[in-house]
Image (cartoon, grey):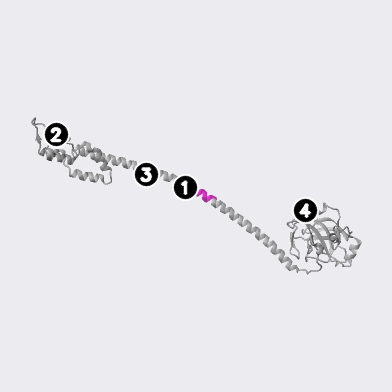
Amino acid sequence: MNTREAINNIELDTESNKLPFEIELIPSEDMFVGFDGRVFRALDKVAIANNTNSKLKYVVIDENHKTDYTSGTGASVEAMGWMSDFFVKEDNSLWAKVEWTQAGAEKISNKSYKYISPVYQIDKSANIISILRAAITNNPNLNLKALNNKNDDNDIKNKKEGGNMPEEKELQELKLALNDAKLKNGELERAINEKDAKLSELEKSLNSKVAEAEAKNKELEKALNEANAKLSELSKATAEREALSIVEKAINGGKIAPSTKEVYIALCMEEGGVEKFNKIMENTPSAGIFKELNLNKGAEGNKTELNEADKQMAKAMGYSEEEYKAIQEKGA
């Protein structure tokens, strides 16, 4: 885990002229902001206390972070006190017991220093992991009990003296604004996720219904085509029966020759064909009238010879000359 260090400042209780034997190192809030705008998170203070207690029995308190300033130089740094037994109080703030050295006790008793400044081990998301050390200082970064130093570990050697502390109300408003923004962001994200889920369900349902409708439409289309085909076949069969009945009646009545049966059936099957056929039959005499026509008989007396008028009549009616002769002879 990649970690960094951050410095915090807390005002010591020196008004009672008694040395504090417990000091607050992290406030009760889960998130707090320094003067420089950095946000620090302490979501699990019990874990922070346990992490710190597991490393060293005593954690040093120096003067003005000299441990950090002289790091790597080999210079010795006098301890102002020692912290131990890190714990979390009922209000969710993190504290430690402290044993002051003579030098540290004198500097606090004579009010040379007013603040304790813990150094945090933090991760990339500014979550506090443990307490590394602390210092007595007069350069706080927050007007709270848990305050961050203005400079991080990379800039600590360029630390500036002084600085104004914001009002308590301004810090509270900033903290509330940050918390409110975090809550609203979470609510917005949940609302978007819920809407996306609903849209996905609606889309899935719509696609399912469209597929069902298309399947039913294909079934109905197939059934309609089959019904139309059957109706067409039935209509054709009915028309054929009607045409056959009409034509055979005409043949039996001697109005048309049997050889013209298929031609007249085809005529009747056409649109308006039956009306055309009936009109033709109205103007066509039956075979019974031929006995009144002018007939030429042969020498035997029983054979009919057709004159030119008879031949034209037979042709007009669609009979062959032999068929017309048979009709005439039958009528005679």
- The image's mark for residue 330 is 2
Task: Name the element at disc 3.
Answer: helix
- The image's mark for residue 228 is 3
Mark 1 and 2 residues: CB-CB less than 8 Å, in contact? no
Left or right? Give the position of 55 relative to 37.
right
User: Quick check: 97 above or below 161?
Assistant: above
211 part of magenta stretch = yes
User: Quick check: 220 above or below 297?
Assistant: below
Residue 302 rendering spot, x and y as whole percentages: 10, 31
Looking at the rendered structure, the kind of residue marked 4 is Ala
Residue designated by label 1: 214
- Of residues 19 and 216, which is closer to you in this image? 216
Query: How far apart are the two marked residues, 3 and 1, measured between alpha carbons?
Result: 21 Å
User: Residue 132 falls in which quadrant of the image?
Assistant: bottom right
Sequence-first disc among 2 and 4: 4
Query: How far apart are the two marked residues, 4 and 3, measured between alpha carbons?
Result: 81 Å
Task: Name the element at disc 2.
Answer: helix
Sequence-first disc among 3 and 1: 1
Looking at the rendered structure, the kind of residue marked 1 is Glu
Q: Residue furthest right?
A: 102
Q: Which residue is drawn at 26% across and 40% down?
A: 265
Residue 263 rendering spot, x and y as whole percentages: 25, 40
Is residue 12 at all visible to an observer of this figure? no
- Of residues 12 and 265, which is closer to you in this image? 265
Query: How far apart are the two marked residues, 2 and 4, measured between alpha carbons?
Result: 130 Å
Looking at the rendered structure, the kind of residue marked 3 is Asn
Residues rendered magenta in the picture: 204-214
